Image (cartoon, grey):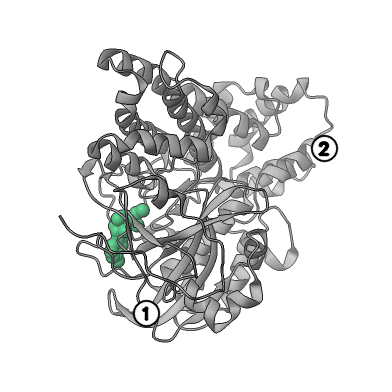
Amino acid sequence: MTAIPDFPVGTNTTISGLGSSFADELSGLSVPWQGAEAPDPELLALNEDLAVSLGLDVAALRSADGVAVLAGAEVPAGAKPIAMAYAGHQFGGYAPLLGDGRALLLGELVDADGDRVDLHLKGSGPTPFSRGGDGFAVVGPMLREYLVSEAMHALGIPTTRSLSVVATGRPVHREGAEPGAVLARVAASHLRVGTFEFAARQGEVVRALADHAIARHYPDLLDLPETGENNRYLGLFTAVVEAQASLVAQWMLVGFVHGVMNTDNTTISGQTIDYGPCAFVDAFDPAAVFSSIDHSGRYAFGNQPAVLKWNLARFAETLLRLVDSTPDAAIAAVTAVLDSFDTRYERHYRSGLAAKLGLPEDSLDQELVDDLLTLLEEHRADWTVTFRALADELRGNPAPLDGLVPRERSAPWLERWHAAAERDDRAAGERAEAMDRVNPLYIPRNHQVDAALKAATGGDLEPFAKLLEVVTHPFEARAEWNEYVSPAPRSFAESFRTFCGT
Ligand code: AMP
Ligand code: MG
């Protein structure tokens, strides 16, 4: 048997009081580990608001000691950093051991709301789980995760957050040499469906893992019995099905394509995680795929709810023994819950879409939705711009919508939309305001993100900082931000590709 190394002993006092409940409560699911040295660390981005909400000292984080911690080069005093083990279904095929191949869980903090969160580093160097990879990450993709995750947070969508990006000064080999970087990520936890897939094959530890997940994310379930019809493990499955159905509905409503919905990237908390090959659609297009490796379109925009349900079925399999000692009864119980996914998803999607259209939920009939989607698809109308144009239409300004869909094609649908609002006693202007509060003006447009990251990789952080400012205020119309509203030029959109693990 290979010896498990001891936890590295840290002396850096930038961050204190990091907890280690995952490592302490669950044996065999992680390895104590430490990040690589950073030859010449430089702080590229620091989320000061997030730092403050975590009780962290901004000045200390900006100091040489703080940057060394955020780069993974130094261990905070008293911390027990680990690389977590997990498995996962990647593009449908099972990989029994993935794990943090280039990441570390530094420890846990309690945020301003009293919730326990993980402080995690990505790109911090090789670990026992690195397999063929080098364990590193580079500036562009780490700033990409920072930008898109913070945009998602500002859109009100559950997500991991980004605390910082540090350039390490280490050249990392990709297409050519690129500047290495480490992202500090904050998450409700790093428990994934893949963590359960790994634990279930280890044996009894899956029960301890489920108890740990319940205590951390769904503590109300602790009131439920451990066995019997209404047990806490079936409760855990139901809670995750609900959280993920809500999450994927929110992705669909904002046009977000995750791009790599493997089971190791599906969280138990219901937060979006891992912003590698993600992108936003311009025109509504269920077949939209951006990832360079998703040849079959498994993770296409319109496939996301179905894939999520498939991932939840993999989660269910890991819980069978806990749900009922009789296999047939366990399968029947989880299947009934899994079957509820479609209704749950539809409920979230419909209520979100009703709000986007300024309609009471019960006035939204399926035909009205389907016909709108067909119209937008036919005319390749920009998804984000359309809903703002509809609010303008309500304010008596038809020009924005006419720029997207010719009036003779939109008129019949608009008539039905106005009719559907008849039972709404709000004035048109009031409805338009409510629509603007849920329909973003600014999303991370693929061409803008690309340009900002190229500049940042070359040393110019200005476009990144500006884009970050815009996309973290998605509902706040400002004339000087007009250039961020438009979709990419067609020529860019047609050739745009995203990449995993870079
Ligand atoms: P992802 O597609 O980013 O969710 O990563 C899937 C798996 O690949 C995880 O186990 C990662 O830790 C691992 N991985 C991705 N990039 C690297 C890398 N450069 N070095 C080592 N492991 C990596
Ligand atoms: Mg991942």
Mark seen at residue 25: none
Query: Is the residue marked by circle 2 packed among few (<14), some (14-19), or many (20+) residues within 10 Å?
Result: some
User: Could you tell me how far apart the alpha carbons at marks 2 and 1 are, in whole angstroms?
Assistant: 56 Å
Q: Nearer the viewer, residue 58 or 76?
A: 76
Where 342 sits versus 441, above or below?
A: above
Which residue is most to the bottom? Answer: 40
The reply to whether the residue tagged 1 has its Cβ within 8 angstroms of ligand 1 is no
Which label's residue is closer to the chain start, 2 or 1? 1
Q: Nearer the viewer, residue 110 or 476?
A: 110
Left or right: residue 43 versus residue 303 is right
If the image is split into quadrants, where does the C terminus sit? bottom left
Percent across and percent down for residue 415 are: 68, 27
Percent across and percent down for residue 192 are: 39, 44
Amino acid found under the numbered disc labelled 2: Glu
Find disc 2 in the rendering and name its residue. 430
Find disc 1 in the rendering and name its residue. 37
Amino acid found under the numbered disc labelled 1: Glu
Left or right: residue 159 versus residue 337 is right
Asked if residue 496 can be seen in this view, the reply is no
